[in-house]
Amino acid sequence: MMFQVTKNLLCSFIYFIVLITQCSCEVLQLDNTNLESTLANNQVVFVNFYADWCRFSQMLAPIFEQTAEKIATEYPTPGMVTLAKVDCDKQGGIAQQYHVSKYPTMKLFYNGKPAKREYRGNRTPDGIAAFIRDHLKDPVQEFANLDVIYELPRQKRNVVGYFTSKESEEFKVFNNVAKILKDDCDFHAGFGEISKPERTTGDNIIFKPDSEAQPEMVFLGSLTNQDLLHAWAQDKCVPLVREITFANGEELTEEGLPFVILFHKKEDTESLEAYRKEVSRLVSFKTSVNFLVADCETFSHPLHHLGKSVRDCPLVAIDSFKHMYMFPNFNEINTPNQLKQFILDLQSGKLHREFHHGPDPHIKALPEDPSVAPVVNDNPEVISAEVQASDKPAEEEKPAEEVETSPPESIFKQLKPSEHRYTLTDRDEL
């Protein structure tokens, strides 16, 4: 009996040793030859984009190695989690592909797709490991009856899937998309008999917006096409108007788009709805500006910079990361094309030009009245007098004195990635 126990313990010890030796604790160096295969063959790949000459990258290197050892012992199964790194000087194409603008940048990839948000937390093995663990949690909430879904509060955006089986390919794709967008939407799923009443035409996915006034939307594409489902869900889950806070300010500035911001008091929902209504007409500007809302109390400093205070809210301003420009009158926010023209004036340079040199000159042509016949003068003496008058040199008009002004400097650019944590690749980018 004692021999058998000893034998079992010895076998367990040998198995443990084999497991440890098989697990890869080293950080994988990525280049063009192994990038695609690494992303395809691992559920999670956590990547450090670095430059050897960057002192912050040098400081992170040993920490990243320690994190790799920690993760390898927690997740020894091959293909589960891999830590990797990219030398951005040698692999500039990869850095450009993933929009790396500072060193070090840490990004998580789930089933080959980059997570929406990069890692910005503490640069410690525990901090990074916790971030990876969080992304391995199941983001989909399984419901036991349909009443849970019918009674979902509409304060949040929800994506609901009705599936035949939890083992189906359709649900696997749904789950993968949920892991990428879990910070923007809540995901729910039901299976078998529970979801059957909602599967009259087969498995389906529905988006429930965060407002009773907006209709639910059904995904009409292939449920096994992850790229298609991801694009659809991202369009629904990431709102056109977002709230800026100190927590997400750095991330928003890194998108590199000018801010169009409504400053309003928290209790003032009327101005918020008016702003959202007008922005909904400007979807075509989604890729050129960021439509944001900000709490007046929290962001009172930018208001002060504009010569305003919390008492002046609501108001709308543009921060171009160089200067700030204020929308003339919030009461005209829903006047057709007013906000649109304000954005167009930013893009054409008119706002900047007029702040420096005053309003652009406007030449007004006198309107012609076709009902008034031209006056013909047949009197030669009058004609002669008119000619003589026209021969007199006109008095030179003194040009108006140009008063140069300067718009307030950007405040929100101060939320950009700190130079105490990163080496920026282009200091004029933001």
Image (cartoon, grey):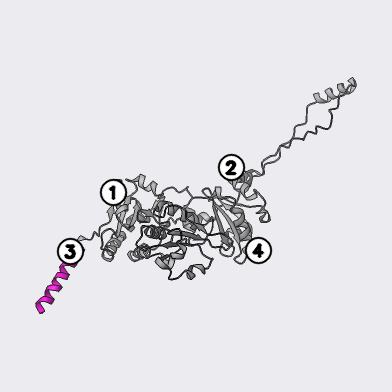
Q: Quadrant of residue 82?
A: bottom left
Residue 348, which numbered label?
Answer: 2
Per the image, the residue denoted by label 1 is 34
- Is residue 5 covered in magenta? yes
Please name the residue shown 60% across and 45% down the image: 344
Q: Secondary structure at mark 2?
A: helix
Q: Which residues are magenta?
A: 1-19
Q: Nearer the viewer, mark 2 or mark 1?
A: 1
Per the image, the residue denoted by label 4 is 311
- Is residue 287 covered in magenta? no
* Distance in Å between CA atoms under marks 4 and 2: 32 Å
Please name the residue shown 62% across and 50% down the image: 339
Q: Nearer the viewer, mark 4 or mark 1?
A: 1
Q: Secondary structure at mark 3?
A: helix
Work out whether 298 lies above or below 356: below
Q: Quadrant of residue 364?
A: top right
Q: Secondary structure at mark 4?
A: helix
Work out whether 159 lies above or below 362: below
* Distance in Å between CA atoms under marks 4 and 1: 57 Å
- Is 62 placed left or right of 215 in the picture? left
- Across and down, in percent, residue 27 comes to 27, 56
Say if mark 4 contacts mark 2, CB within 8 Å. no
Q: Nearer the viewer, mark 2 or mark 3?
A: 3
Per the image, the residue denoted by label 3 is 18
